[in-house]
Amino acid sequence: MRGGRSYRRGTTSRHRSVVRGPWSVALLALLLALPAAAQPVQAPLAHDGTVPVWLTAGPFEQPVVGFGVPADADVIGEATAQPSEGDAEASPWAAGGTVTWRPAAPGHDGFLDFHAAFADVAPGDGPERIAWAKAGYAYTTLVSAEAQDVLLLAGSNSRLAVFLDGDRVHAFDGDRNAVADQDTVRLHLAPGSHRLLVKVGQSHRNEALQFFAPLEWQWGFYARLLRPDGTPADSLPRPSGVEARVDLAGGAPEAVVASSIFFRETPEGLRQRYDLTLTRRDLRPASGE
């Protein structure tokens, strides 16, 4: 069943084989050194329509105008963005001056946490650089089996911009706590693949006290796809034939070769067994969920 799935992030699977001679070790080293193409990973929507897999990049500093009012700046080429895992983007604010696109998945509540995705933690005791305004991106490819209209229900902390196939189809310019289904965006999906890019911005105003309640220390968004059939939002079924796809780096798996205590006689002499353990990341539904 597809309903209720959650997805592992950064898990591994291991495979063991026997290396039978020096030539095998040399061949292994050669194979692991070869570059590999990005590997697409495609996953169905969650039972409530939540988009399950994304690539994320950030943080990026954004400009301010006037009396500290955040201004939107395109820092990645939003209209043409189509990243794969490991692609680099210039970000002078980040350590080393660049950030890379990395896989991320929403939590059980459907919230994709940019603080966790970018290892952005609460302020500590030491000096830190403070940005007046910043932004992060999330990207996925929607794959539709048929022509259909869908509703994208989104919520964000704070500013939000949504791009479909390079076109800005929605924007919210303000400060708010993220709540699921705050915004509704009607999208048309032709059969095939569609580039979906989400941008979430924050500013110094995000920590300011509001009149009714303080904004929470959070950064991220909710996003789910539903059918526009006129039924209440909490009971809308998922669109049929829509999945999400990201391109994960096809780099070489981690390999460990260890000698064993086992030997055997062969016509060529005494041979020792070596154990090879290959570790690769996986993005499969978590068992039992």
Image (cartoon, grey):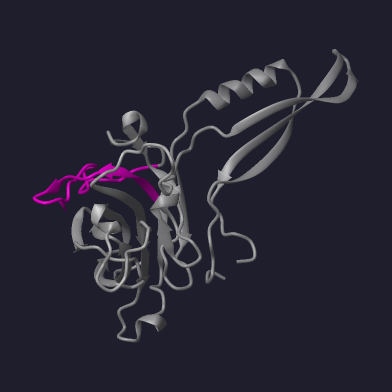
Residue in the foreground of this view, choosing between 243 and 51: 51
**The magenta stretch spans residue 70:** yes
Residue in the foreground of this view, choosing between 89 and 95: 95
Q: How many marks?
A: 0
When the figure is inspected, residue 62 is found, relative to residue 273, above or below; the finding is: below
Residue in the foreground of this view, choosing between 256 and 17: 256
Residue 191, percent from left and from top: 31, 63
> Residue at point 24% right, 71% down?
211
Residue 151 shows up from this direction: yes
Looking at this view, name the residue that lies furthest to the left: 66
Would residue 72 be found to the left or right of residue 6 on screen? left
Would residue 103 be found to the left or right of residue 163 on screen? right
When the figure is inspected, residue 234 is found, relative to residue 52, above or below; the finding is: below
Which region is colored magenta? 55-84
Would residue 44 be found to the left or right of residue 90 on screen? right
Main secondary structure of the magenta stretch = loop
> Residue at point 87% right, 25% down?
261
When the figure is inspected, residue 195 is found, relative to residue 108, above or below; the finding is: above
**The magenta stretch spans residue 61:** yes
Residue 128, percent from left and from top: 35, 38
When the figure is inspected, residue 190 is found, relative to residue 19, above or below; the finding is: below
Residue in the foreground of this view, choosing between 268 and 125: 125
Residue 67, percent from left and from top: 11, 51
Q: Quadrant of the C terminus?
A: bottom right
